[in-house]
Amino acid sequence: MNNVRNHRANPADSYELFGVKLPQLRMILLLIGIALALLLPLVLANFAIFQMTQVLVYAIAVLGLNLLTGYNGQFSLGHSAFYALGAYTTAIMIDRYDIAYYWTIIPAGLICFIGGFLFGLPALRLEGLYLALATFALAVAMPQLLRYEHFEGFTGGVQGIDVFKPDSPLPMLNADQWLYYFVLFWGALLIIGAWNLVRGRTGRAMIAIRDNPIAARTMGINTALYKSVTFGVSGLYTGIAGALGAIVAEFVAPDSFTFFLSVWFLVGMVVGGLASIPAAIAGGIFILYMPNISEEVISIFFGNDPSAKALIWVAFGLFLIFTVYVVPNGLAGLVRRFVIRYATRRGD
Amino acid sequence: MKSTRLWASAAAATLVLGIGTAMAENAPGVSNSEIKIGNTNPYSGPASSYGTIGKSIGACWNKINDDGGVNGRKINWISYDDGYSPPKTKEQIRKLVERDEVAFTFQTLGTPTNSAIHQYMNKKEVPHLFVATGATKWGDPKGFPWTIGWQPNYQTVGAIFGNYIVQNHPNGKVAILNQNDDYGKDYVIGMQRAMGDKFDKLVVKRETYEVTDPTVDSQIVSLANSGADVFVNISIPKFAAQAIKKMAAINWKPVHLLNDVAASVASTYKPAGIENSIGIISVDFYKDPNDPEWKDDAETKAWNAFMDKYYPDGDKLNKMNAYGWAVCHTMKAVLEQAGNDLSRANIMKQAANLKQVHVPMLLPGMFVDTSPTDFYPLEQMQMMKFDGERNVRFGPLISAETE
């Protein structure tokens, strides 16, 4: 009897992999992940820490997009605009109003929440590809707005704004390490938030709307409200990523937030895997390291040949096709398939 | 007590010695056989047409290495793609400085991209040499002693136009069209500086446009109605072509001074109509290898041979490949001048101490010239006039110092 109830709670719990029960294995992996995230910066070089910080920033943005697309089924090509909004909010607060950088993260997130929510309202009438087009317009318009002369007093126009990098308040950490932990703190907070969100009532409603909006409405879910709020939350995540990104890059300019950035978030989300939280980190890693790896592969094969520079994106394209072909459901999907294939039921 | 003091002074002495040797030490990335130079270029993305500059510089180093390098050291040119995206530039530059440990960076391309690393390079005290952008802010030896530009900056060009007007059309009525951003404004600042109080007297009308505007037709009509007989046109090729067309349509024929950015037969004069473009005056500072004038010129021949052997895929019609060749030789001159003291401080010092250095493909008589207070290496240009086929140079080299 007891056994049956356990099955209902989560059938996967009775399976094991490498002789360890799945929930325990998950816990072990999580602890290893946390230990690595906390300890690696203490031994790595500054540049590697800087890259890890950027991975976290991208991961937060990908997570934001994943909440919208993976869990709620709404497409967006406009997340570079929310990222830009968050980044400029932080940059303007620091540069024009002398506000300390740590006070700027929450306002940047809130402004992007409001922006996302308001954009989500008209987007309610749009589905699938039409929504993708509407959000595409947002991504294209944003850099132009940032350049617009009447906003120049705030945005700095084409020249952008310099953001001074914060010094570490702790003597044992250098500036790069401190910034990493600062971003890690926000990343952890947002991941826990997302985890709680998607497991609860709200998350079930979001997923129900994705899977079958009519059925969801029949069940009494306020689809309009949930869709708009999801857009807002997604904007909040991406906006916070933008705010952190501005502090990490120490500079914002319209050219940093082109439509291409949206495509990157999309690529990171799809490669990592839809509707999965750890996948966002995999996506962040892919966004940051894959172009660099392509660049290095090309330089290994072609050495100093100046014309080979054109091939970097060919190599990247091949990697991408390969990834999508081998792991069609993203890296998260690969892990899932691996578990299904090799996990054995206890006593089998 | 005594021994403590002795220890302290011994430690201090070691420290002083340590610092002393550290100062004479070569920069990271410099060995007896190699100098590592870092660079970022847009090999992909919206500005990828500029990528050929990075490629031609890479090819130039290959040639210099085959000829024995600089003072016996080979150049290891590490050039990364930044896609013209400032955060990517920041990442790639940190990789170059911290992981690849380059001695310095050279010809990093773009105004927003270089802005993103401006502070970092100066905080880290890594020479940020001969950046590939025309903005004026790169020549600030006091605020940013580790950053130096190369090409004549926009204010210099503006000043040359200003001087030309004062000398040749002292009673002219001047109309100005400029793009409404830092690039356009820099030209006007240069003109104001050169013309002094005559600027307000001579300029009868000024119009601006936004990069996002569909046309500049209405601006041209309004400038024409002012009765101006000198027109200073500070616009990028698309708008320059529109302006030339509209001027022909309404039959406005002032002396037309066009900025160097748009003085291209292929991208401006052809679309605007060759017959409408005859007589347009502009400026340049390096040789156009396609100009028949340079057919038998030794430097152009050497450049052609170099392109054939080291960069065969490069487009010889593209002037930017000649630019890459010239700027690469400027860097070579700095390294030769630095000799065997290849510390970062000395490399920066030599970059700011180039005295009348001629590099190939600059116009005859032109020099690269810098000093610890003058971080603008090229401040001369020559005027040229479009004759229906090509830009024909005329008059002497004109210099305009930027303060």
Image (cartoon, rainbow, N blue to C red):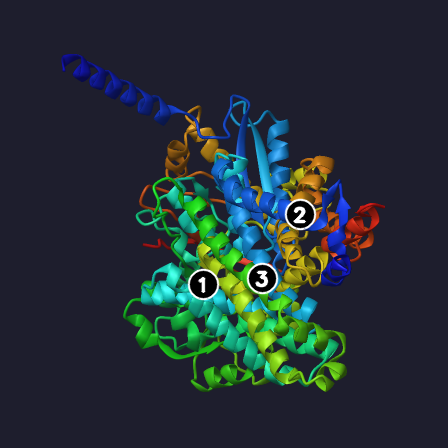
The part of the image, by quadrant, that contains residue B186 is bottom left
Inter-mark Cα distance, 1 to 3: 21 Å
Residue B147 visible to the viewer = no
Marked residue chain, label 2:
A
For marks 1 and 3, the one nearer the N-term is 3
Inter-mark Cα distance, 2 to 3: 29 Å
Left or right for A328, reference B4: right
Q: Are marks 2 and 3 on the same chain?
A: yes
Left or right for A310, reference B241: right
The part of the image, by quadrant, that contains residue B239 is bottom right
Q: For numbered disc 3, what is the local secondary structure?
A: helix
Q: Which mark is residue A304?
A: none
Q: Residue furthest right?
A: A348
Left or right for B96, reference A67: left
Amino acid identity at mark 3: Ala
**Which of B208 and B88 lies nearest the eye of the viewer?**
B88
x and y, in percent, of residue B242 in the image: 59, 76
Give the residue at x 51% y 24%: B31
Inter-mark Cα distance, 1 to 2: 49 Å
Q: For numbered disc 2, what is the local secondary structure?
A: helix
- Which residue is tagged 2? A24
Q: Are marks 1 and 3 on the same chain?
A: yes
Look at the image and tell me in which quarter the C terminus of chain B lies: bottom left
Q: For numbered disc 1, what is the local secondary structure?
A: loop
Where A250 sits versus A31, above or below? below
Amino acid identity at mark 2: Gln
Instruction: Mark 1 vs mark 2: give the one in front.
Output: 2
**Which of B341 and B391 lies nearest the eye of the viewer?**
B341
Residue B129 visible to the viewer = yes
Q: Which mark is residue A160?
A: 1
Give the residue at x 68% y 69%: A71
- Which residue is tagged 3? A61
